[in-house]
Image (cartoon, rainbow, N blue to C red):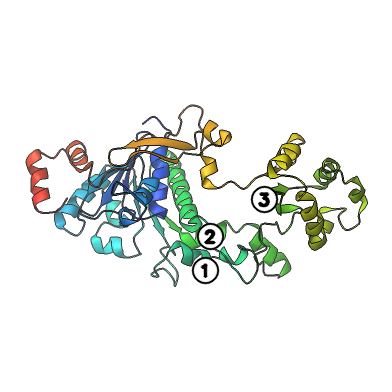
Amino acid sequence: MNGPLAGITVIDLTRVLAGPYCTMLLADLGAEVIKIERPGTGDDSRAFGPFVNGFSAYFMSINRGKKSVTLNLKQPEGREIFLKLAKCADVVVENFKPGVMEKLGIHYDELVKTNPRLIYASSTGFGQTGPYKSRPAYDLIIQGLGGMMSVTGPSADQPTKVGSSIADIISGIFTSYGIVTALYNREKSGMGQAIDVAMLDSMIAVLENAIVRYSATGEVPHPIGNRHPSISPFATFHTKDGLINIAVGNDDLWKKFLEIIEKKEVISDPRFLTNKDRVHNWDSLEKFLSEEMKTKLTDEWVTLLQKYDIPCGPINDVAKLFSDPQINARSMLVELLHPTTGKIKVPGNPIKFSQTPAEVTCPAPVLGEHTHEILKTKLKMSEEEISSLQKKKVI
């Protein structure tokens, strides 16, 4: 690996989504990620569909570029192997409920005794502190608790989950961000540290203007469909054959937009003079624009508006992403060859480096695929020792 994190070793104890998404990003950036899994079953997400030749596509989507090692942490030999791996690692990432790592005897305070430079990241639903810390958490629960569903959807009586598992994914991104920052700090201080990232905290952090709007006005934000609460027109409209998104972000763009659609007479309409006026008179504006947008096909509007730099675009389904020239030009769909599933495409890495590129080159590992390699190269174990561990079901 030649990415910016080349030479960094990450021990990954995470399962399902938030944690694995974090460590996947680190693997893309060049880190060696050793994924510790339960013998026999592995990460829970290996059982999530859809399946291709018996292999979970769900698991494949968030575990590319990692090495899989099976290890029973409840057995003394398994614990000792983990402690040895952690001693020579740069980062340990886990997403167990608070207290589990302590019960296993492999928590931060224990690991730092032999590796004071270790970065230890914990990714959980509610964090290591607070009255909710022991609650179970899934994306749907966090989106509801964290307010995201309350501002998403067509109307106030239909709060809606974001289409992707945004609470897990954002938490994974924040955890990887924290790890990289701690690694940078370690270069100055020489010391590692513990990182505590909660899915609920992450949801609050990305609510952006909803928090400020309530704080400033006392008005509770509610779902308003695809339009923007503070900018207008910034919404989805029906065309002659489909839908189009239009985002007119300032008054100059509004005047330009009206000229393009040949409605100059509306420029002086007092209801729509300023952005504030247009937000306040949204119902009238929506009626006017809905009628206009239905006069052309989506592609016709996109071609016309983009010619004059009016922000707009169609609503692509996932199938259309595979043929989109911009997405392909940016290598955002990468084809991997998996030993079980054959060729499959996965999302690429969105961070583009000029000198140390982030690369998606290896598929997700088969369960325990690298156990023998890691024990032999990292811990210098003999074939007899490894065979003995297999017989005892430690690995």
**Please, what is the three-letter code of the amino acid marked with disc 1?**
Leu
Residue 243 visible here: yes
Measuring 43% from the left and 46% from the top, which residue is drawn there? 179
What's the mark number on residue 243?
3
Answer with mark 2 or mark 1, whichever residue precedes in sequence: 1
Q: Quadrant of residue 383?
A: top left
**Please, what is the three-letter code of the amino acid marked with disc 2?**
Met
Mark in front: 3 vs 2: 3
In front: 190, or 371? 371
What's the mark number on residue 145?
1
Image position of 229 (left or right of 361): right
Which residue is under mark 2? 203
Circle 1 crowding by C-alpha within 10 Å: few under 14, some 14–19, many from 20 = some
Q: Measured from the top left, where is residue 44 in percent x and y?
A: 31, 57
Instruction: Please report contact status of discs 3 and 2: CB closer than 8 Å, yes or no.
Output: no
Secondary structure, mark 1, is helix
Q: Quadrant of residue 30?
A: top left
Tell me the distance, in whole angstroms, between the alpha carbons under discs 1 and 3. Answer: 32 Å
Look at the image and tell me in which quarter the N terminus lies.
top left
Mark in front: 1 vs 3: 3
Answer with mark 1 or mark 3, whichever residue precedes in sequence: 1
Image position of 91 (left or right of 138): left
Residue 30 visible here: no
Tell me the distance, in whole angstroms, between the alpha carbons under discs 2 and 1. Answer: 9 Å
What's the mark number on residue 125?
none
Secondary structure, mark 3, is strand
Instruction: Please report contact status of discs 2 and 1: CB closer than 8 Å, yes or no.
Output: yes
Measuring 65% from the left and 61% from the top, which residue is drawn there? 210
Circle 2 crowding by C-alpha within 10 Å: few under 14, some 14–19, many from 20 = many
